[in-house]
Amino acid sequence: MLLERLTTSEQTVLTPISRGSEEPIAARKSIHNSQGPQETTKALYFTDRSLTPFLIILQGRLGEVVLRDFKMAIDRPNRYRFLFKTPDPDYGFVKQEITDDDGILPGFDGKVVAWLEEDCL
């Protein structure tokens, strides 16, 4: 028998699953806090020092998440320029710099895609 690990923000649950289980994934129980499930947004970000992007989960829906939320989630010591993938009607997809902490982050395909460039000033 295999064990499947389901992790939530508050607790981890191990659920036994047999190898030939016919039970659909949607029928398995998940545990949420007493306030119900929270909306989250995935964010991928690239740095100059890594070939592989980093993934973070931001609290809030796409279109509501702001730069301050992103900065708090990455918690990096250096100063950065924050560039985000955004659609432009004239040029297709471009990198848009956002400097205002209250600026809403643009989304692409249901997630935020960002590049962090070290600010040399």
Image (cartoon, helix red, strand yellow):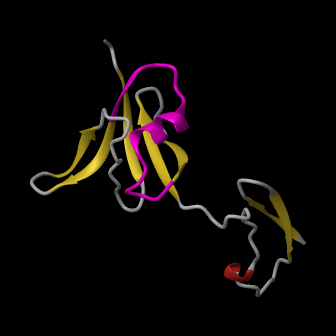
- The quarter of the picture where the C terminus appears is top left
Q: Position of residue 46 (x, y in %)?
A: 42, 37
The residue lying furthest to the right in this view is 1
User: Which span is picked out in magenta?
Assistant: 60-82
The residue lying furthest to the left in this view is 90
- The quarter of the picture where the N terminus appears is bottom right
Query: Residue 58 or 47: which is nearer the viewer?
Result: 58
Question: Quadrant location of residue 28?
Answer: bottom right
Q: Position of residue 111 (x, y in %)?
A: 42, 56
Q: Is residue 7 above or below residue 18?
A: above
The residue lying furthest to the top in this view is 121
Q: Is residue 72 magenta?
A: yes
Left or right, 31 with respect to 65, comes to right
Q: Is residue 96 above or below residue 25?
A: above
Q: Is residue 12 above or below residue 24?
A: above
Question: Quadrant location of residue 96?
Answer: top left
The residue lying furthest to the bottom in this view is 22
| Residue in the image at 72% along x and 58% along y | 8
| Residue in the image at 50% along x and 55% along y | 60
Tell me how many marks there are. 0
Q: Position of residue 44 (x, y in %)?
A: 46, 46
Left or right, 56 with respect to 3, comes to left
Q: Position of residue 65 (x, y in %)?
A: 43, 50
| Residue in the image at 54% along x and 61% along y | 39
Q: Is residue 98 magenta?
A: no
| Residue in the image at 76% along x and 54% along y | 10
Question: Quadrant location of residue 45?
Answer: top left
Query: Residue 81 or 34: which is nearer the viewer?
Result: 34
